[in-house]
């Protein structure tokens, strides 16, 4: 009878990143991430990420306060394919095009914990990564979401909008005609059902999206822009479209913003 012992499988840890990606200055990690999350991340040698370069930068920041198990050059860092960034982790209709992330998790089958990290916030929420989580479940691996900032929930909590019924709808079309059409659809849904509508945009389009919102929405609709969440320059402005126009509020094109609208 064989006495070979197989290692217990590792876990997939969902590691939140601070929300200061691309922003200056960057504050200490412990200001937004609890000690248990920082320590769990510092113990990992294996990572799946959006971008290896930014992941190494995050680990370098972490190493300033928490010893890492090996030099950065020896970390096993795997990137999600570019098509997952552009098209997302899910497809509708024919599921044959669904990305199979199981090969990224082979280290866990050998007994190693793996960290999944995005460039900002919680991986797999408004970011790629759900395919990795799905693969972990299919492989019967334990999935552990660690505690950290989630910009969508921070924005919703600070918005004054309905927090009992809400939807995150991703990005808004960049074409002006399609963008206005989509914004009016979201406004109609919010006003008819009471469901808050949350969406995001690439920071360099912040001003353009704000102007489209002010031009497309009804004066009485409530518009929320939550900018620089958890950062020293954090700003959450919640007012009707008419009040936005009267106060001439603006957005910069460098700071991440969560947009929301509702009754």
Image (cartoon, grey):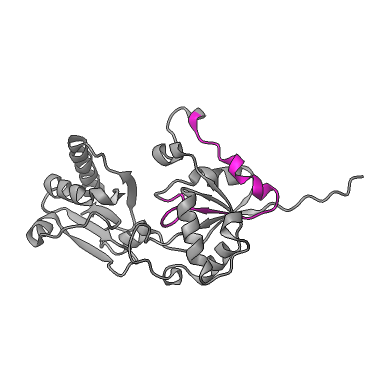
Q: Which residue is depicted at the point 18% across and 56% down?
A: 222
Q: Which residue is depicted at the point 45% across and 46% down?
A: 128
Identify the image quadrant of the N terminus.
top right
Identify the image quadrant of the C terminus.
bottom left
Looking at the rendering, the stretch of residues picked out in magenta corresponds to 97-125
The outermost residue toward the left is 246
Rendered position, 70 above or below 51? below
Quarter where residue 21 is shown = bottom left
Q: Magenta includes 81?
A: no
Using the rendered image of the protein, determine whether residue 56 is visible from the camera's viewpoint. Answer: yes
| x and y percentages locating residue 11 in the rendered image | 62, 54
Rendered position, 33 above or below 45? below
| x and y percentages locating residue 119 in the rendered image | 43, 54
Using the rendered image of the protein, determine whether residue 195 is visible from the camera's viewpoint. Answer: no
| x and y percentages locating residue 109 in the rendered image | 68, 47
Q: Which residue is depicted at the point 25% across and 65% down?
A: 235
Left or right, 195 with reference to 27: left
| x and y percentages locating residue 42 in the rendered image | 57, 64
Marks counted in the figure total 0
Quarter where residue 176 is shown = top left
């Amino acid at each position: 009878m064989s006495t070979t012992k197989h290692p217990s499988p590792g876990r997939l840890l969902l590691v939140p990143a601070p929300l200061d990606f691309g922003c200056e200055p960057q504050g200490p990690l412990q200001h937004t991430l609890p000690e248990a999350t920082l320590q769990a991340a510092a113990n990992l040698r294996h990572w799946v990420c959006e971008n290896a370069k930014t992941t190494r930068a995050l680990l370098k920041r972490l190493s300033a306060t928490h010893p890492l198990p090996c030099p950065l050059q020896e970390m096993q860092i795997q990137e999600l394919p570019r098509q997952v960034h552009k098209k997302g982790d899910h497809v509708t209709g024919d599921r044959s095009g669904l990305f199979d992330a199981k090969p990224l998790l082979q280290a866990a089958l050998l007994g190693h914990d793996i960290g999944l990290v995005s460039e900002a916030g919680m991986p797999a929420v408004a970011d790629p990564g759900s395919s990795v989580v799905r693969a972990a479940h299919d492989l019967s691996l334990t999935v552990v979401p660690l505690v950290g900032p989630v910009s969508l929930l921070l924005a919703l909590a600070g918005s004054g909008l309905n927090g009992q019924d809400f939807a995150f709808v991703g990005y808004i079309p960049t074409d002006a005609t399609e963008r206005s059409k989509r914004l009016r659809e979201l406004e109609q849904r919010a006003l008819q059902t009471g469901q808050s509508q949350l969406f995001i945009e690439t920071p360099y389009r912040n001003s353009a999206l704000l102007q489209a919102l002010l031009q497309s929405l009804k004066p009485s609709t409530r518009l929320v822009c939550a900018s620089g969440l958890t950062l020293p320059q954090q700003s959450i402005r919640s007012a009707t479209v008419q009040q936005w126009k009267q106060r001439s509020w603006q957005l910069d094109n460098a700071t991440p913003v969560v947009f929301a609208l509702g009754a």
